Image (spheres, rainbow, N blue to C red):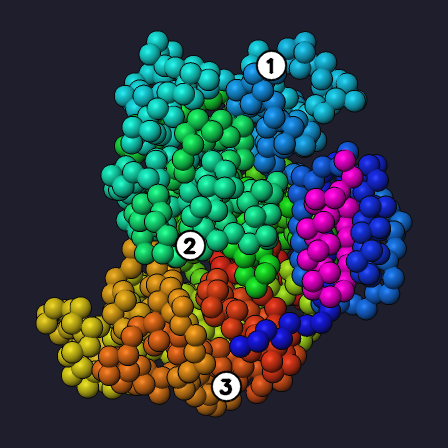
């Protein structure tokens, strides 16, 4: 298929760093006019804003050249880009600087080591040679060390370190690169490394004579990694667990101890060249790897090349999560090692990342053999961010280091936020929270799945932290509709403490809100329940700055529906005033409820039962049925017949699971999304427009996507021995055509794609192409995750639309 990308696009950039007063705006003017781009540039307290439009290729050139040709004295600490609809600019102008408006103090994210600092730590003649805490005004820790605003050393975790005369002189000199560099430090006065043995765990943590100190600690840690040991490294925003990525035994041991069976591990490479030896790297991917954000980038492995990375690092996965060193500590360690390491979050399975060395001994004592620690406290946990390139744009899948807590600016056409600040507490999995201050929405760093006690604590900590940091008392608290989510309970608790009964959460399609009316100045006075999939759509509309009307496609694993069933394959018509569920997947049962989420074979059985009733148990040769014992099948038969513990769902994620089971790719999963991922991987290399039939029928004034003809065709293909890859491709293509069919029926030009399913590269890529062919305008996520990490933003938008 040919991609029918629009002729003209708009690129919005927010550039932060040393970009003011260094000739940056004239440079942008020259570059834009040379490339014949229209638009404007200005300065504001939030950074330099650039809005340019023109042909895609010219805009891509603009973005790359902006970084490579920028004025010598400028330095970019953060570059956020969004691709948006053109607005019809003619000519390019430098606009008046914005000075007015509430100057919300901006907390910068942590910034990867700059080239100048990098040169210093590898220069034997420099006083910061081999010093792992080197930084300057252009780079280093920010968000992870700030205790309160304003951003002064006394308000950071560097406050206990007194600068030596040399560092102080740099700090005081306006011409020095370290002028007012708050975390400024050197070997004489700053934080120091130590290497601890796991035998310290449980003992008193006083000085131990056997501990290595300073650079020797780093060398000893490197030696341990080389010997196949697991080393917990206290990094920028938390601990990472490192092992030699070439050592299968070591990687497997880490999996066993961390209780992480198959979920891919992230890798840190010593250099870009070493990444390129393993993976295909596009110019945009290269830029991301090297960017001030330095996220984990999902890169395609080079096929049919012998890899030094063991398969157990990312079993059966055609992609690797790769990153480059982003602190001096990582640079020094990786330079010493010279080979890629697994660098995964320092936690037990899905708990939040560990930040404190004493806590780490306790929590990670059973995992790591050694602890490379230091005495600069981490104020708040910040995981490594994860991005992938989707349709030649960046798509953030986990928003944390480098991105959090930069704000998203809300478009007033979408959400008429009154001046009341909103706190949104997000969803249950991949939780983030968000706080709105006027049109700015600050989204927290990734918190994680709220399943464990440490995760609950992290959630409460971050929620309190954001209110304290921005000195905002939210008047409105927005939460999911699911009554059992910890975040929902927390929201009601906060509200409850304000002296009113918890509001009844029962929303209706048109207003989607429930509210209570108590008023008290210091507590949130309103509680708003926002339907999960509606939040997804609003989140995507917000970051793409589009106004209603639009068709929202919200596909994911699980979310509490307005009718009390589990939703996940939903279409909404969003207008100025209403949001209507306009189409959905035909419902089916999940025998065993939660268990079915872990076992695609159960979901597949639920699906078959919906078509064939008891007759489904006659398909004895089918992999799905063979995956159960006779006794299990008897129990499931009763469950389904009597609808015992078999909740009804319209979830697209579960439909993926079921198909993965039918073609025998996966009967039980080890981590969330595994079956769907493997179904996507299976079609790798297959190019076909073949497609199953998914029928669109009208039932009770709603459009329903009936998957039964597709499932019957899949059964027939399985019987005929058609390979899983081709079946997967025909399945994906069917879903794409289903979106196109609904879009045609609804007739709205704008189609918004949100929910975890759109992390799937094939699905998103193909649906965007097909929608464009049919003259629709598709939108997908860029800087905010399509998964539940983006829910909090959507909840804020919903609160802004509510009549309060
Ligand atoms: Zn620097
Ligand atoms: Zn010093």
Circles 1 and 2, Cβ within 8 Å, touching? The answer is no
> Residue 559, position in %: x, y?
44, 65
Circles 1 and 3, Cβ within 8 Å, touching? The answer is no
Q: Is residue 57 magenta?
A: yes
Q: In the image as oriented, which residue stretches furthest toward the left?
A: 630
> Residue 800, position in %: x, y?
67, 61
Residue drawn at point x = 77 percent, y = 46 percent: 48
Residue 732: quadrant of the picture: bottom left
Circle 3 Cα neighbour tier, 10 Å, few/some/many (<14 / 14–19 / ≥20):
few
Q: Which residue is mark 3?
A: 702
Q: Which residue is mark 1?
A: 125
Q: CA distance from mark 1 to mark 3?
A: 73 Å
Work out whether residue 468 or residue 516 is closer to the camera in this orientation and state it: 468
Secondary element at image label 1: loop
Secondary element at image label 3: strand
Residue drawn at point x = 68 percent, y = 57 percent: 60
Question: Left or right: 478 with respect to 483?
Answer: right
Q: CA distance from mark 2 to mark 3?
A: 46 Å
The span shown in magenta is 47-72
Circle 2 Cα neighbour tier, 10 Å, few/some/many (<14 / 14–19 / ≥20):
some
């Amino acid at each position: 298929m040919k991609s029918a990308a629009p002729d003209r696009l708009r690129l919005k950039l927010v550039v932060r760093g040393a970009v003011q007063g260094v000739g940056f705006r004239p440079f942008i003017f020259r570059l834009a006019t040379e490339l014949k781009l229209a638009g404007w540039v200005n300065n504001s307290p939030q950074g330099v804003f650039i809005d340019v439009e023109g042909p895609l290729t010219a805009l891509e050139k603009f973005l790359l050249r902006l970084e490579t040709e920028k004025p010598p004295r400028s330095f970019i600490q953060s570059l956020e880009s969004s691709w948006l609809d053109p607005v019809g600019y003619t000519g390019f102008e430098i606009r008046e600087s914005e000075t007015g408006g509430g100057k919300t103090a901006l907390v910068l994210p942590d910034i990867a080591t700059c080239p100048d600092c990098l040169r210093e730590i590898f220069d034997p003649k420099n006083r910061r040679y081999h010093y792992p805490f080197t930084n300057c005004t252009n780079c280093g820790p920010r968000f992870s060390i700030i205790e309160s605003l304003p951003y002064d050393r006394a308000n950071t975790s560097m406050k206990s370190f007194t600068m030596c005369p040399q560092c102080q002189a740099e700090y005081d000199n306006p011409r020095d690169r370290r002028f007012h560099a708050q975390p400024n430090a050197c070997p004489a006065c700053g934080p120091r490394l130590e290497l601890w043995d796991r035998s310290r765990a449980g003992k008193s943590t006083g000085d131990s004579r056997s501990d290595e100190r300073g650079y020797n600690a780093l060398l000893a840690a490197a030696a341990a990694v080389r010997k196949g040991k697991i080393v917990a490294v206290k990094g920028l925003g938390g601990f990472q667990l490192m092992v030699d990525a070439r050592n299968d035994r070591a990687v497997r041991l880490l999996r066993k101890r961390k209780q992480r069976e198959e979920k891919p591990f992230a890798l840190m490479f010593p250099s870009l060249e070493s990444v390129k030896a393993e993976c295909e790297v596009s110019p945009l991917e290269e830029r991301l790897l090297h960017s001030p954000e330095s996220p984990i980038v999902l890169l395609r492995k080079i096929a049919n090349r012998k890899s030094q990375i063991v398969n157990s690092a990312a079993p059966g996965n055609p992609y690797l999560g790769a990153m480059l060193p982003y602190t001096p500590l990582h640079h020094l360690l990786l330079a010493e090692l010279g080979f890629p390491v697994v660098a995964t979050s320092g936690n037990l399975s899905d708990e939040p990342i560990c930040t404190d060395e004493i806590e780490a001994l306790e929590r990670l004592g059973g995992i790591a053999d050694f602890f490379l620690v230091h005495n600069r406290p981490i104020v708040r946990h910040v995981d490594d961010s994860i991005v992938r390139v989707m349709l030649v744009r960046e798509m953030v899948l986990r928003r944390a280091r480098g991105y959090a807590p930069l704000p998203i600016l809300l478009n007033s056409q979408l959400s008429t936020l009154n001046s009341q600040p909103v706190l949104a507490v997000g969803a249950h999995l991949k939780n983030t929270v968000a706080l709105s201050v006027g049109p700015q929405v600050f989204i927290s760093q990734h918190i994680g799945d709220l399943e464990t006690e440490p995760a609950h604590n992290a959630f409460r900590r971050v929620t309190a932290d954001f209110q304290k940091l921005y000195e905002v008392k939210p008047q409105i608290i927005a939460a999911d509709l699911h009554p059992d989510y910890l975040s929902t309970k927390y929201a009601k608790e906060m509200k409850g403490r304000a002296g009113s009964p918890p509001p009844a959460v029962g929303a209706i399609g048109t207003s989607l809100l429930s509210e209570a009316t108590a008023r008290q100045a210091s507590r949130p006075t309103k509680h708003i329940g926002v339907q999960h999939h509606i939040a997804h759509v609003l989140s995507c509309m917000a970051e793409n700055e589009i106004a209603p009307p639009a068709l929202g496609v919200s596909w994911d694993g699980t979310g509490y529906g307005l009718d009390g069933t589990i939703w996940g394959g939903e279409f909404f018509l969003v207008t100025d005033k209403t949001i209507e569920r306009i189409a959905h997947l035909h419902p089916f049962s999940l025998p065993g409820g939660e268990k079915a989420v872990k076992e695609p074979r159960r979901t597949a059985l639920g699906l078959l039962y919906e078509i064939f009733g008891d007759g489904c148990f006659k398909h004895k040769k089918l992999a799905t049925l063979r995956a159960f014992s006779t006794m299990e099948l008897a129990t499931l038969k009763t469950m389904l017949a009597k609808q015992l513990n078999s909740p009804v769902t319209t979830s697209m994620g579960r439909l993926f699971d079921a198909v993965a089971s039918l073609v025998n790719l996966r009967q039980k999963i080890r981590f969330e999304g595994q079956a769907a991922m493997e179904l996507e991987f299976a079609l790798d290399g297959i190019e076909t427009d073949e497609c199953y039939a998914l029928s669109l029928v009208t039932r009770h004034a709603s459009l329903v996507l009936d998957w039964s003809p597709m499932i019957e065709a899949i059964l027939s293909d399985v019987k005929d021995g058609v390979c899983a890859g081709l079946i997967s491709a025909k399945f994906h293509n069917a879903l794409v055509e289903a979106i196109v069919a609904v879009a045609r029926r609804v007739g709205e030009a704008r189609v918004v794609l949100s929910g975890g399913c759109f992390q799937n590269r094939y699905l998103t890529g193909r649906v965007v192409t097909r929608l464009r062919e049919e003259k629709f305008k598709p939108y997908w996520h860029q800087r905010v995750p399509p998964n539940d990490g983006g829910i909090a933003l959507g909840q804020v938008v919903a609160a802004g639309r509510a009549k309060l």
